Image (tube, helix red, strand yellow):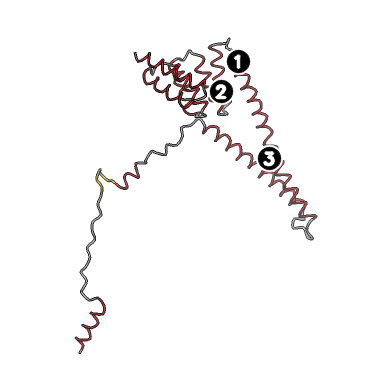
Amino acid sequence: MSKTQAEQYKEQGNECVKGGNFAEAVVHYSHAIKLDSHNHLLYSNRSLAFLKMEQYYLAINDARETIRIQPSWPKGYFRKGEVEYNAGAYREALMSYRQALLLDPSDSCIREALTRTIKELEKLRKAESREPLLFTSGGVCLGVVIVLADYFLTKEPSIRHIGLQILLIAVFGGFGFLLYKAYAFLQDTHKSSLLEKPLDLYQVPDKMNGDHQKGGEVREEQPSERKPHRKGGTSAARQRYRKGKS
């Protein structure tokens, strides 16, 4: 009975995917998985729905679960490769597609995905070899402009020695290369973060709870003891002092 109901949820999810309602499809697939948690098709379909929503971490988790349940099914590796490709992890996607192709060499979709990924990797390699030169050249050009402006646009150039001028140009070229390294690092970090678990903002650190509670009990503030004040205040004290003096 539970598998029959799970199949109904699966069909409802498939209809939602066809209609482009991916969030509702995830809900139906999730209900089906609760009833039939060992069905690899459900995880595969939900992975596709998450991918369409650009929820890459959840999508790749379902793809990995699909592979775990049915490691001989090529579409599980294909699903994993699709998530990695869309997240910009082309090297990882290439390995996933190759694994899928080993299991089913006749699948044209896998072959097309593999060809597409190889082309993207070629573009990436060309960019990785070209961009350092572009950034460094940009820094050198900026250094040359500064040296020429100092020489021609000022009455007395501040950098007269040719050696210092070359050194300044080289320094700006180095800055350009460092800028490229920072740019490449940010790109790699962004791509890898797409497949990582997002930060849970609802999780309260234990330390915060410990600040308010200790040993499971809430501490109450003890009222501070105050010394009794004599009636009348400062003016009354002065009058008493005068009377005593007289």
Q: Tell whether label 2 touches label 1 (CB within 8 Å).
A: no
Residue at coordinates 24% horizontally, 52% vertically from top-left?
A: 220
Residue 22 locus on image (x, y percent) = 49, 25
Disc 3: which residue: 135
Residue at coordinates 65% horizontally, 23% vertically from top-left?
A: 119
- Label number found at residue 93: 2
Spatial CA span between label 3 and label 2: 29 Å
Out of 219 and 47, give the one closest to the viewer. 47
Q: Is residue 61 left or right of residue 220?
A: right
Q: Earlier in the sequence, mark 1 or mark 2?
A: 2
Residue 139 locus on image (x, y percent) = 70, 44
Q: Regarding mark 1 in the picture, which secondary structure is present there? A: helix
Viewer-side label of 3, 2 = 2
Q: Regarding mark 2 in the picture, which secondary structure is present there? A: helix
Disc 1: which residue: 111
| Amino acid carrying mark 1 in the image | Arg
Q: Quadrant of the C terminus?
A: bottom left
Viewer-side label of 1, 2 = 1
Q: Tell whether label 2 touches label 3 (CB within 8 Å).
A: no
Which image quadrant is residue 116 in? Answer: top right
How packed is label 1: few (under 14 Cα within 10 Å), some, or many (20 or more)?
some
Spatial CA span between label 3 and label 1: 36 Å
Residue 216 locus on image (x, y percent) = 25, 43
Residue at far bottom of view:
246
**Above or below, 79 relative to 206:** above
Q: Quadrant of the N terminus?
A: top left
| Amino acid carrying mark 3 in the image | Phe
Out of 10 and 204, give the one closest to the viewer. 10
Q: Count of labels shown?
A: 3
Q: Earlier in the sequence, mark 3 or mark 2?
A: 2
Q: Earlier in the sequence, mark 3 or mark 1?
A: 1
